[in-house]
Image (cartoon, rainbow, N blue to C red):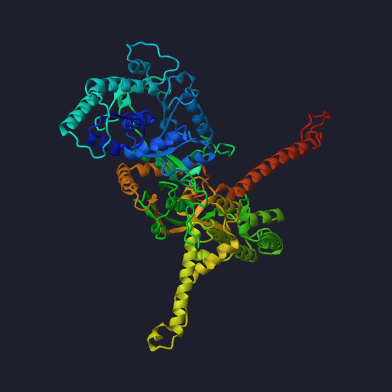
């Protein structure tokens, strides 16, 4: 009889023993039994890959051999944890579905302590712990990570292996493996004595003549014994294997609140407790993104400090792409980690052909897919694949600050220059004086010709002449005109002057206010390139910067081709010989202006520079979606011209990735549900602009522009009230200063005094 307690592949030994009719039994006394139990539980959770962490190098060798010979999971095995091992586990791509630790309680504490310090335990629900002893009351992280699944040996497992009725008392030095070996020896040795009597070996012959009937009988008896042992509670013999393993019944504990038993494992078969389920493994992806408002940006508090996850310490993200990714994780049922590129942002290719940023991380497998404001370009499609676009066509747009208009209550006075106003005042004074002189010295005036004008006429004193000159500037007119022909000639000329001046002022005022309201520095990129007063820039090494570089290079190449054609001596190129270059060198000038204005490092810097130029003499050329987002939240900004160089945004995956079709399908499903429309309305909501001051030209002239007219009216009212007060005071003082004279009645003989009469 041959009893094999090794953990290596023994198919050659088994076949040789069967050929010679020697009963062969393979007994597992290693950690492989525990690993198989862990594997059966992970398969019940729909797992497909796992990272095993074991306490000793020998356990690693035993487990690797088992995984090679008999396993259904993609697995990676690590031994003692140190800094190098922790770093290797953290760098695993793709991210493993599960972590499994098989060890005794004290070894388990040490392994988890190193894993926690190394930052491996970021998702405790992915960790599964199998304890190989009964000292689980000494487990140190039970309350720290209750989400971890713990597989503990039942107390009745001791009773089963000791072949005692439950409940029984397990000895302190209980060794499941040693008891299992004793049970196997007891059964097999007894069977060999009763069924296959041991014969004395009297000779050695390498080529014996075997009794085939005896060999068949022994092999059949061995198979019957294995079948009987498979029915015994202390053994676990799988149907597809003849390995004799101990029946280690395990309880499965996992709960974030009560640490309750959710299932068990008996003879390698997991079973769920009533009203409990084994949570299946969620797929886990490393998703790359980079900051660009409003697509994805790190969340900050009111003080500008970055908000971090209280558990992992990682920054919290928000934005259009983050909400979109969260919705994808729901409909596709996966977990994810957000990863920022270590070098670069979206992705640039160096002269050696290597990529950085999100594209570079996809190429190297650092991330599973990238979701950001990543434009679908032909250059990027050479190394990565894109799924269906999730956002409408976006392009490049120009943002400028609205010019700060100088407001003045007496703005209407600036329509005419100071010398014009002084000339008008001089004309009024001169007209009044001349009118007074003409009325005074003309023999035909109403004052000097009483016979012609016996009725009461207007007396043009100096005061009355000034009043006539002033009131003639109003639509009401100056009132009664002089009677003399000379005076009327002066008045007619003055009225013509008044009409022309009023018409000139009215026309200039309307034109002045209209031109001011309609003042816009530029209307397009072409106009921007033709002027030199307004400076403009882009984000350095951004897609917009690359666009202008490529367009400039294209103009250079086309110019070289045209020059070669026109300078060629062949007759076929004569049609290209023209005096003027037929292509505008627009982008050469634009790129030169951008470089002279110095590209900014971030979009925030670009918007800040635009906002600082109150005279609207600086422009920022950037992604149209980001510019419109900023305009919807800042009253100072406005867009100039139309969107150009339109391209779609898309999710990037590795070339040939299985995620491409799946992501495309769910994006189309979300489009059917109009999800992207609601998401766009959330981030490009113009409700914030309702708080902006009204600057619409169709609303008419503002009060600030003509406020001086009202002030002049109020000043006139105040002067009138002051004048009224002066008149009342003057009249009362004059009344008090009048003398009273006593007058005797005429024709009376006596000298009796009469009552005093007030002189009038």
Residue 526 pos. (x, y %): 48, 65
Q: Nearer the viewer, residue 735 or 513?
A: 513
Relative horizontal placement of residue 570, taking residue 736 as reference (left or right): left
Give the quadrant of the C terminus.
top right
Residue 713 pos. (x, y %): 62, 46
Rendered position, 708 above or below 430: above
Occupied quadrant, residue 132: top left
Relative horizontal placement of residue 718, taking residue 348 as reference (left or right): right
Give the quadrant of the N terminus.
top left
Give the number of callouts: 0
Residue beneath the point at 53% across and 47% down: 635
Q: Nearer the viewer, residue 748 or 624?
A: 624
Rendered position, 196 above or below 11: above
Residue 702 pos. (x, y %): 55, 49
Can you name the residue that lies furthest to the left here? 213
Can you name the residue that lies furthest to the right here? 751
Viewer can see residue 760: no
Residue beneath the point at 35% across and 23% down: 181
Q: Nearer the viewer, residue 5 or 235?
A: 5
Q: Nearer the viewer, residue 395 or 453?
A: 395
Viewer can see residue 643: yes
Relative horizontal placement of residue 440, taking residue 639 as reference (left or right): right
Rendered position, 152 above or below 715: above
Occupied quadrant, residue 286: top left
């Amino acid at each position: 009889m041959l009893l094999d307690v090794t953990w290596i592949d023994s198919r050659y030994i088994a076949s040789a023993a069967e050929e010679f009719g020697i009963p062969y039994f393979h007994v597992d006394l290693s950690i492989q039994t525990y690993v198989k139990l862990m594997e059966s539980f992970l398969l019940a959770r729909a797992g497909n890959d796992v990272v095993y962490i074991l306490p000793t190098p020998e356990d690693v060798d035993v487990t690797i051999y088992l995984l090679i010979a008999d396993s259904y999971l993609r697995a990676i095995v690590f031994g003692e944890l140190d800094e190098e091992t922790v770093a290797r586990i953290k760098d695993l791509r793709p991210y493993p579905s599960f972590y499994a630790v098989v060890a005794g309680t004290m070894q388990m504490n040490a392994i988890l302590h190193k894993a926690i310090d190394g930052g491996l335990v970021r998702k405790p629900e992915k960790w599964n712990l199998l304890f190989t002893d009964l000292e689980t009351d000494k487990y140190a992280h039970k309350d720290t990570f209750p989400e971890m699944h713990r597989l503990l040996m039942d107390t009745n497992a001791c009773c089963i292996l000791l072949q005692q009725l439950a409940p029984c008392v397990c000895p302190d030095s209980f060794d499941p493996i040693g008891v299992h070996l004793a049970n196997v020896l007891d059964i097999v040795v007894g069977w060999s004595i009763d069924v296959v009597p041991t014969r004395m070996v009297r000779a050695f012959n390498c080529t014996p003549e075997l009794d085939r009937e005896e060999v068949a009988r022994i092999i059949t008896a061995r198979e019957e014994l294995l079948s009987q042992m498979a029915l015994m509670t202390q053994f676990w013999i799988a149907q597809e294997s003849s390995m004799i393993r101990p029946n280690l019944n395990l309880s499965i504990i996992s709960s974030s609140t009560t640490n309750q038993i959710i299932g068990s494992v008996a003879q390698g078969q997991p079973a769920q407790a009533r009203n409990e389920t084994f949570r299946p493994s969620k797929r886990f992806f490393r998703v790359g993104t980079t900051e660009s408002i409003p697509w994805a940006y790190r969340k900050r508090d009111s003080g500008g400090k970055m908000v971090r996850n209280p558990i992992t310490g990682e920054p919290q993200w928000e934005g259009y792409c983050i909400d979109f990714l969260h919705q994808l994780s729901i409909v596709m049922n996966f977990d994810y980690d957000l990863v920022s590129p270590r070098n670069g942002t979206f992705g640039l290719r160096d002269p050696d052909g290597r990529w950085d940023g999100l594209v570079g991380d996809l190429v190297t497998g650092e991330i599973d897919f990238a979701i950001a404001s990543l434009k679908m370009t032909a250059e990027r499609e050479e190394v990565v694949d894109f799924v269906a676009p999730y956002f409408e066509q976006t392009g490049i747009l120009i943002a400028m600050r609205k010019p700060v208009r100088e407001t003045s209550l007496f703005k209407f006075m600036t329509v005419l220059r100071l010398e014009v106003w002084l000339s008008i005042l001089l004309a009024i004074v001169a007209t009044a004086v001349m009118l007074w002189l003409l009325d005074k010295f003309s023999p035909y005036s109403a004052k000097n010709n009483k016979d012609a004008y016996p009725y009461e006429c207007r007396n043009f004193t100096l005061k009355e002449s000034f009043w006539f000159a002033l009131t003639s500037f109003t639509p009401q007119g100056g009132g009664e005109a002089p009677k003399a022909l000379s005076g009327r000639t002066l008045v007619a000329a003055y009225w013509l002057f008044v009409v022309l001046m009023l018409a000139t002022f009215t026309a200039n005022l309307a034109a002045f206010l209209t031109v001011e309201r309609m003042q816009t520095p530029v209307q397009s990129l072409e106009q921007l390139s033709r002027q030199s007063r307004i400076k403009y820039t882009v984000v350095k090494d951004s897609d917009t910067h690359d666009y202008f570089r490529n367009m400039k290079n294209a103009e250079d190449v086309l110019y070289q081709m045209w020059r070669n054609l026109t300078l060629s001596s062949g007759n076929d190129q004569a049609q290209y010989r023209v005096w003027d270059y037929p292509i505008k060198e627009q982008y050469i000038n634009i790129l030169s202006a951008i470089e002279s204005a110095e590209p900014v490092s971030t979009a925030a810097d670009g918007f800040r520079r635009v906002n600082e130029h109150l005279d609207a003499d600086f422009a920022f050329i950037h992604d149209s979606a980001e510019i419109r987002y900023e305009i919807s939240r800042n009253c100072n900004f406005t867009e100039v011209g139309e969107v150009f160089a339109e391209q779609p945004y898309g999710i990037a995956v590795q070339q040939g990735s299985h995620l491409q079709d799946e992501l495309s399908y769910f994006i189309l499903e979300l489009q059917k549900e109009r999800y992207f429309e609601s998401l766009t309305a959330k981030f490009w909501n113009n409700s914030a602009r309702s708080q902006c001051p009204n600057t619409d030209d169709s609303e008419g002239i503002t009060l600030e522009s003509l406020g001086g007219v009202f002030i002049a009216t109020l000043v006139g009212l105040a002067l009138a009230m002051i004048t009224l007060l002066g008149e009342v005071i003057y009249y009362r003082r004059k009344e008090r200063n009048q003398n009273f004279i006593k007058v005797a009645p005429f024709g009376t003989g006596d000298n009796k005094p009469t009552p005093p009469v007030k002189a009038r």
